[in-house]
Amino acid sequence: MLTEINEANFKSEVLESKIPVLVDFWGEFCAPCKTLLPVLDQLAGELDGTAKIVKIDAHANASISIRYGVRAVPNLIFFKDGVTGRAEARRPRSRHYRRSRFLP
C-alpha cells in the first residue's frame, strides 16, 4: 500500500528523501487514478528500498499541486535529490487521434 503524504510531511518524505521518489497526484473522484493504484502498489513492492512511491491528494493539498504545475490527475512526478522530472499519465496519442478525429 502506498504511503499517503500531505503538506506537513511532503518536505521530509519527498524533497529530503535519500532515495528517488515517484509522487502520484490523485483525486478521490478520479476513476483513472483508482485504476492506476494497483499498478503503483505492485511497483512499490518491487522497488522496496531502492525507490519509493507515494500518493498525495491533489485537491486537498492544492499548494503543492500548484507549485508543481499539476492541472489534471492522475499526474506522476519523479523526484531525485529534491529535483523533479515529469511523467504524465495520458491516453496514447494514436488512440486519442482515432477517437477525436470524428469530432467536429
Image (cartoon, helix red, strand yellow):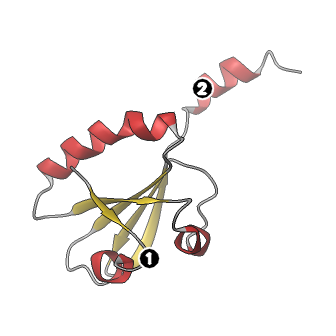
Label 2 CA crowd tier, 10 Å (few <14, some 14–19, many 20+) = few
Answer with the quarter of the image where residue 97 lies.
top right
Residue displayed at 52% across by 59% down: 58
Q: Which residue is mark 1?
A: 7
Answer with the quarter of the image where residue 16 lies.
bottom left
Work out how far the residue at label 1 is from the one at label 2, CA to CA, in angstroms.
37 Å
Farthest left residue in view: 49
How many numbered discs, if any? Answer: 2
Whether residues under marks 1 and 2 lie with C-beta atoms below 8 angstroms apart, the answer is: no
Label 1 residue SS:
loop
Label 1 CA crowd tier, 10 Å (few <14, some 14–19, many 20+) = few
Of tags 1 and 2, the one toward the viewer is 1
Nearer the observer, 91 or 32: 32
Answer with the quarter of the image where residue 2 lies.
bottom left
Residue displayed at 31% across by 60% down: 54
Q: Position of residue 28 (x, y in %)?
A: 48, 46
Q: Residue 26: give its label.
A: none
Q: Which residue is mark 2?
A: 94
Q: Is residue 61 above or below residue 33?
A: below
Farthest right residue in view: 104
Label 2 residue SS:
helix
- Indicate which disc, 1 or 2, sits on the residue closer to the N terminus: 1
Nearer the observer, 74 or 91: 74
Q: Is residue 83 above or below residue 2?
A: below
Q: Position of residue 65 (x, y in %)?
A: 56, 67
Residue type, numbered disc 1: Glu
* Image quarter in which the C terminus is found: top right
Residue type, numbered disc 2: Ser
Q: Position of residue 92 (x, y in %)?
A: 54, 32
